[in-house]
Amino acid sequence: MVTQKYKDMLQKKSVIRTLSEFATKRGQEIGYENVFDYSLGNPSVPVVQDYTDNTIRLLQTKTSSELHGYSPSVGLPSFKEKVAASLNKRFDMNYTANHIFPTSGAAGALAHALRAVTSPGDDVLTFAPYFPEYNCYVGMTGANLRVVPANTADFQVDFEQFEKMLTSNVSAVLINTPNNPSGAVYSAETLKKLAQLMEDKQKEYGHDIFIISDEPYREIVFDGKKAPYVSKFYDNTLSCYSFSKSLSLPGERIGYVAVNPTCTDADLLVPMMSQISRGIGHNCPSSLIMMGVEDVLDETSDMTVYETNMNLLYDKLIELGFSCVRPSGTFYIFPKALEEDAVAFCNKALKYDLVLVPSDSFGCPGYFRMAYCIDTEKVVRSLDALERFVKTEYPDR
Amino acid sequence: MVTQKYKDMLQKKSVIRTLSEFATKRGQEIGYENVFDYSLGNPSVPVVQDYTDNTIRLLQTKTSSELHGYSPSVGLPSFKEKVAASLNKRFDMNYTANHIFPTSGAAGALAHALRAVTSPGDDVLTFAPYFPEYNCYVGMTGANLRVVPANTADFQVDFEQFEKMLTSNVSAVLINTPNNPSGAVYSAETLKKLAQLMEDKQKEYGHDIFIISDEPYREIVFDGKKAPYVSKFYDNTLSCYSFSKSLSLPGERIGYVAVNPTCTDADLLVPMMSQISRGIGHNCPSSLIMMGVEDVLDETSDMTVYETNMNLLYDKLIELGFSCVRPSGTFYIFPKALEEDAVAFCNKALKYDLVLVPSDSFGCPGYFRMAYCIDTEKVVRSLDALERFVKTEYPDR
């Protein structure tokens, strides 16, 4: 019989996807260049050329079985070794290949990591504003996602609320820095305090509490800064990464979980995640994609456009009277809407062909998200639309 | 806390994988060319050249966002359309793109299809001998896999046993034709009888019972014959396919579920499977792999070697006195062991560097599987080892 549970899920379509589909449809009417589509985090910059050249070379020189044969269910050894070496060099860690589990992007990484350290009925904490797909990943494991309210002053952690919610039923804390949708990057100070509190609670409760660290935006940080590496602060950390943003490869769905070598059961977690993969029938990412990526691990696409776009938008938003925390990274900005109901606000914006995402599904009502991974030329043109929108719809401000 | 359930699964390692790892290790000692490794179904013939040429051309001519941008969570439209068209042409079906769900190989296809039509506590029937990974796919949904005993006369269906086990608690029947490990291909007569019985039971119980049809070996059929297309016989069929064998692309993990357009909720099942994907974090296969495959859908690698190997092995096994049903397809053969305990039999074979898989995990004790997707030259050399093994270990036969 068709399963009612998944049938019911069809009603709860992603707001972001729905808006993105609206933008595509509107583009067919007036030309997509005239739709200021800030809905989807689809990287606009090209893949690194070395990735393309490397993949062509592989296809031209390797045998079919070298390239396309079955990979082990824990992942391709060469990919795992090179990821470990790259992380060790960049973040002063001690990973071996046995701590790296290749996945279908960050989504796959999060879903596997969560399942490996939670049981049905457990609580998983995350911090608002948060990526709404976390509901799906956590929900599928049978655990409950509980959302710590946002610290809207700077989108770091509200420790008072966090401590209150960090009960003995919590088995994992899911964090995302640099953050989608706020653009905040957790400071070393925030991470130290977070780690200390969690270590205290681990001792108090007598069981592990893992950090599941969602890091697809790790390489997109502004003002010449770097994002502190979460796993450096807390042993029980599973770092979930995707090459979607850093290499501009979202459609290839390639990422990994990096298991901190000093965490509990560090040598079992990758084999455990491979058992989870057996059950969901995923197994391992595509060989050709892993091989193409493994030699360009330390490169990134040219992502300066995101900082340029952020500055343009931030300045305009402030000029127009928005309240907004300046993003430190990612390609998102998260201003306060000009009325309490962010959905109403974003619906009005559509009249100006501005596609903004209301913040309700991010667990932080009254805000909106703009994904500015689009051409700067279009961002510039959108500023006029933004001004017209604000001055027409909110004349009394 | 690290989840005990997946930790426990580490004890139950796949017998096939374990033997394959043994073969690799033994190969390091005596040269892999001297290990008669019949353990793993890893295609030995090269990928079709058009696939490689096509992928290189894509990498050289398409833009980064065309090639590597996010694909919709229900899959790449061009891939879906072309798969539907190909199936319609070959099997006289009426699929549209909306009935095709791209997956991570047949494993992903089966896991999604099973989850879409079963609920925890339901029974899923399959027929011995069966691919042991079915335990993982079914187990992960919370349903129970129940195994209809083998019809060892010809490895078609034992209808008497099947009817007895087809209770109202059964929501899906998982079949595999051409069959791993027996090499049997279900005849049109078998499929007609199966469909009739299931339709009767659907009426009697007042609910749907789906066929989940596992078809990665659909294109490997011997003696110039073709495998009857299961979905043609029964409306409530979800066909699960992989290009691993037909194109020799196992490492790329690319396949699909094809939803029979006349089945219950035919237009909902693909979106439902995409919701399942959201939860397990898989989403969609790699864009580049889908695009590379979509233009070579009607091609296959040169698979004549499998028929050559089958005939060599079958004739030798019969000559040596084995009881064996001649395979009609796949690259497996499934003879009766020469003693009751197939594990003991296969352990003795290892002394002759013959890596055979005992049948216990296939739900049909007393047999063994040989995966003959290896070079014919090696098959020929293995025949001597087989003869020495049998004559030395079982001299009184």
Image: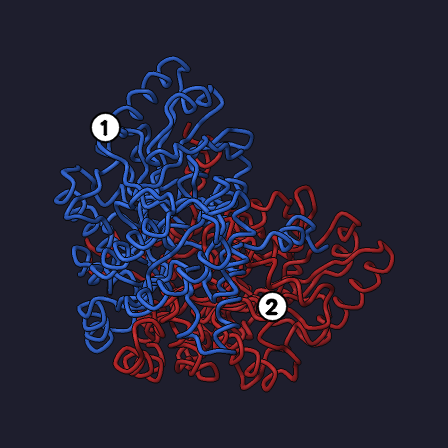
Chain colours: A blue, B red
Horizontal side of A68 relative to B125 (left or right) equals left
Chain identity of mark 2:
B
Of B289 and B66, nearer the camera is B66
Q: In which quarter of the image is the N terminus of chain A?
A: bottom right
Residue at which label 1 appears: A189
Spatial separation of the CA atoms under disc 1 and disc 2? 53 Å
Horizontal side of A122 relative to B268 (left or right) equals left
Q: Do labels 1 and 2 share a chain?
A: no
Residue B68 screen position, x and y as percent = 34, 68
Horizontal side of A100 relative to B258 (left or right) equals left
The kind of secondary structure element at disc 2 is: strand
Q: Residue at x 19, y 53 (%)?
A: B29
Residue at which label 2 appears: B239
Q: Which residue is drawn at 38% across and 13% down?
A: A204
Tag 1: Cα neighbours inside 10 Å, few (<14), some, or many (≥20)? few
Q: Can residue B60 be seen in this view?
A: yes
Chain identity of mark 1:
A
Q: In the rendered structure, which amino acid carries the disc numbered 1?
A: Glu
Spot the residue most to the front: A396
Of B295 and A175, nearer the camera is A175
Residue A270 screen position, x and y as percent = 34, 41
